[in-house]
Amino acid sequence: MNVSDVWDWPFFWSMFRNFVASAAPFLMIPAAVLVVGMLMNAIVSAVSKGKG
C-alpha cells in the first residue's frame, strides 16, 4: 500500500510549519521566564552558600 497517494504530506508539513511559526513566539516567552528564574535561583543559592 502506497500511503503517499492517501496523505498530502507537503500540505501537512506546510501547515505544521505555519503552526510552529505562529506559536513559537508565545511559547518562547514562558520558556525565557523559566530559564531566567532558574538562572537567578542558581546565582542566589551560590551567593548564599559563599556567604554562609
Image (cartoon, rainbow, N blue to C red):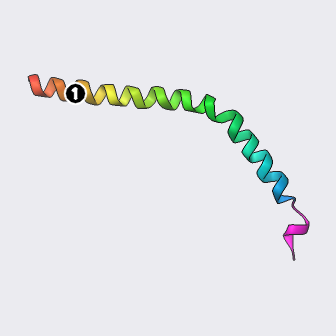
Q: Position of residue 36 (x, y in %)?
A: 40, 27
The picture quadrant where one finds residue 18 is top right
Q: Which is more toward the observer, 34 or 25?
A: 25
Q: How many marks?
A: 1
Boundaries of the magenta span: 1-7
Which residue appears at 11% of the width and 27% of the height?
50
Secondary structure at badge 1 equals helix
Quadrant of residue 20 within the rendered picture: top right
- Mark 1 Cα-neighbour bin, 10 Å: few <14, some 14–19, many ≥20: few
User: Is 3 a magenta residue?
Assistant: yes
Q: For this rendering, which residue is in front, 44 or 22?
A: 22
Q: Amino acid at mark 1?
A: Ser
Residue 48 on the magenta span = no
Query: What residue would you read off at disc 1?
Result: 45
On the image, the x and y values in percent for residue 30 come to 53, 28
Q: Is 42 rendered above or below residue 18?
A: above
Q: Nearer the viewer, residue 28 or 34?
A: 28
Relative to residue 34, is residue 15 drawn left or right?
right
Outermost bottom residue: 1
Q: Residue furthest right?
A: 5
Check the image and report above or below for 6 versus 52: below
